[in-house]
């Protein structure tokens, strides 16, 4: 057990969460609830009047079922990596629990001890506040979903197709039950996987404007994106302190929502504002140019010298490292920021991305990782993503009604896209490239040294968490120099900072 104290440090070096991450942009819109014309699932003919499941029902089921029924999995399908690495990491303290001290808290990180797939076996508990029929229906759906995953893993596509037809008829993303919602999305992704196996189609069209809209909704309704932005900005701010020229490379800048607060701190530095260059990377030059205009206008209003380079390519596919868009000038502090996601391939091959980072030798790399497995076999990815996204669905269902427009936007516009990419598109057999299981481990194995997240980063992460009711169940941990934000006892996002050993 590790005890960590919260020292607020120098407030002048902090980026306060009350600095809003929004633009005065009338073109930014929120998605309305999905309609049959643009939604891949049919609306139910009749309303479901069953009460919603308990707030932690789905994630508890998934962990409990895989733990107790792993012995039913055929012996030749039990992979070593399924034992621990597929599941989100567990931690035992919730720092927004009012019963705990605001100044210090105890932490204990525990990996899930077992996972697996199963069939034809039920493990029941007493749930006094849950309708038994709803419980049994959800349990049966998850059972069938796991049986289907086993069938896909052994290329029994005909049997998988039969089970998927049943799942799509039984589960709907419009139902109050988190179990039915996530089963509907997983069934759709697995249907795409089966179809791709027949047709050989492994890619999907990406609607970046729709993704950005859903991403902004996610930023508004949960603490995860703000946590990623403010903790990374704080680490960059501390690393470049005192430099008169700063260059930031954002590996997937999207709308640039995280940077206005950072700009504001730079513009009000006691020693005077620096000159800031930013390279924003992405796949759509049109959206990059619009983001650059917004950032440039904001910088001009606050008196910050700023230059923006839009680079419509993937970081791992950059050929000319001498290009001024990625290379820093003498005396310039280079920072690289990477908020990872599974919405699409933002950076290209992992090994090429790592090689380029080694060549650039940035003063600071800020990395925010999802605690979900993106690589390995199909079963690896299925088990890991089912644990991970069932917890994310639970976290939204804990305080957002089932018919909430924002919740639908996030679940359909973000979570489903990620599930689909992990299951239907991802994997070395389809992409031809192995994905790193954990970037932190890869950076540590090469020429990078971890920079512990500071007390100021921890303090403002706690401030972000304090804007949400303790009843919402979010939890924060400071472990081994990283910051981890999760729901209840499951870690979902981990923020860390790194520097090249030759840049120290």
Image (tube, grey):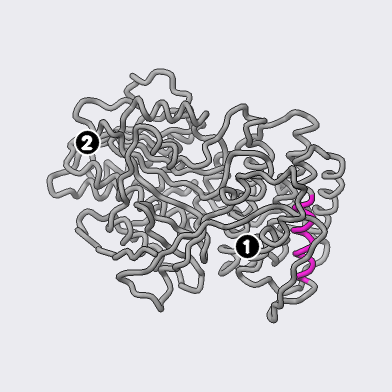
Q: Is residue 173 left or right of residue 303?
A: right
Residue 325 pos. (x, y %):
35, 26
Residue in the picture at 64% in, 72% down: 54
Is residue 43 visible in the rendered structure shown here? Answer: yes
Q: Residue furthest bottom?
A: 128
Which quarter of the image is occupied by the N terminus?
bottom left
Residue of label 1: 59
Residue at coordinates 35% horizontally, 48% vertically from top-left? 232
Magenta stretch mostly in which secondary structure?
Answer: helix
Question: In front: 199, or 453?
Answer: 453
Q: Which residues are magenta?
A: 134-147
Q: Is residue 142 magenta?
A: yes
The reply to whether the magenta stretch includes residue 234 is no
Q: Return the residue nearer the eye: 379 or 76.
A: 76
At which x and y percent is residue 315? 45, 29
Q: Crowding at label 2, few (<14), some or many (≥20) Cα neighbours within 10 Å? A: some
For label 2, the SS is strand
Residue 275: image tag: 2
Tell me the quarter of the picture where residue 136 sits: bottom right
Quadrant showing the C terminus: top left
Q: Which mark's residue is nearer the viewer, 1 or 2?
A: 1
Please tell me whether mark 1 sits on a helix, a strand or a loop.
Answer: helix
Q: Is residue 273 above or below residue 281?
A: below
Q: CA distance from mark 1 to mark 2?
A: 47 Å
The tag earlier along the polypeptide, 1 or 2, is: 1
Q: Quadrant of residue 448?
A: top left
Residue that appears at 86% across and 44% down: 159
């Amino acid at each position: 057990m590790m005890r960590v104290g919260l020292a607020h440090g120098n407030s002048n070096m902090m980026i306060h969460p009350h600095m809003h991450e929004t633009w005065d942009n009338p073109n930014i819109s929120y998605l309305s609830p999905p309609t049959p014309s643009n939604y891949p699932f049919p609306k139910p003919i009749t309303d479901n009047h069953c009460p919603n499941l308990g707030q932690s029902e789905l994630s508890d089921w998934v962990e409990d079922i895989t733990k107790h029924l792993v012995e039913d999995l055929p012996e030749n399908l039990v992979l070593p990596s399924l034992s621990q690495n597929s599941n989100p990491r567990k931690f035992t303290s919730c720092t927004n629990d009012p019963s705990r001290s605001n100044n210090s808290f105890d932490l204990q990180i525990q990996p899930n001890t077992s996972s697996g797939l199963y069939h034809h076996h039920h493990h029941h508990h007493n749930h006094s506040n849950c309708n038994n029929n709803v419980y049994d229906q959800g349990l049966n759906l998850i059972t069938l979903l796991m049986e289907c995953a086993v069938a896909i893993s052994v290329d029994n596509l005909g049997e998988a197709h039969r089970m998927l037809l049943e799942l799509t008829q039984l589960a709907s993303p419009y139902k109050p039950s988190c179990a039915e919602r996530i089963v509907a999305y997983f069934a759709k992704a697995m249907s795409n996987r089966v179809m791709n196996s027949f047709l050989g189609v492994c890619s999907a069209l990406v609607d970046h404007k729709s993704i950005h809209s859903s991403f902004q909704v996610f930023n508004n309704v949960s603490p995860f994106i703000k946590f990623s932005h403010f903790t990374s900005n704080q680490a960059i701010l501390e690393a470049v302190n005192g430099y008169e020229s700063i260059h930031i490379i954002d590996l997937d800048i999207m709308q640039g929502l995280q940077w206005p607060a950072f700009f504001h701190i730079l513009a009000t530095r006691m020693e005077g504002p620096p000159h800031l260059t930013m390279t924003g990377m992405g796949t759509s030059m049109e959206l990059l140019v619009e983001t650059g205009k917004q950032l440039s206008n904001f910088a001009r209003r606050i008196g910050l010298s700023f230059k923006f380079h839009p680079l419509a390519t993937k970081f791992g596919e950059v050929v000319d490292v001498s290009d001024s868009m990625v290379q820093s000038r003498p005396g310039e502090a280079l920072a690289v920021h990477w908020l990872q996601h599974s919405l699409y391939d933002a950076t290209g091959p992992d090994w090429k991305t790592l090689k380029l980072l080694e060549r650039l030798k940035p003063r600071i790399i800020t990395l925010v990782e999802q605690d979900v497995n993106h690589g390995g076999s199909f079963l690896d990815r299925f088990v890991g993503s089912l644990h991970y996204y069932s917890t994310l669905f639970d976290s939204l269902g804990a305080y957002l009604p089932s018919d909430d427009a924002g919740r639908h936007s996030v679940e359909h516009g973000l979570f489903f896209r990620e599930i689909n990419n992990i299951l239907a598109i991802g994997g070395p057999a389809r992409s031809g490239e192995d994905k790193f299981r954990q970037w932190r481990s890869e950076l540590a194995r090469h020429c990078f040294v971890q920079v512990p997240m500071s007390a100021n980063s921890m303090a403002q992460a706690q401030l972000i968490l304090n804007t949400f009711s303790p009843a919402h169940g979010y939890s924060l941990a400071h472990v081994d120099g990283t910051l981890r934000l999760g729901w209840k006892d499951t870690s979902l996002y981990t923020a860390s900072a790194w520097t090249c050993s030759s840049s120290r």
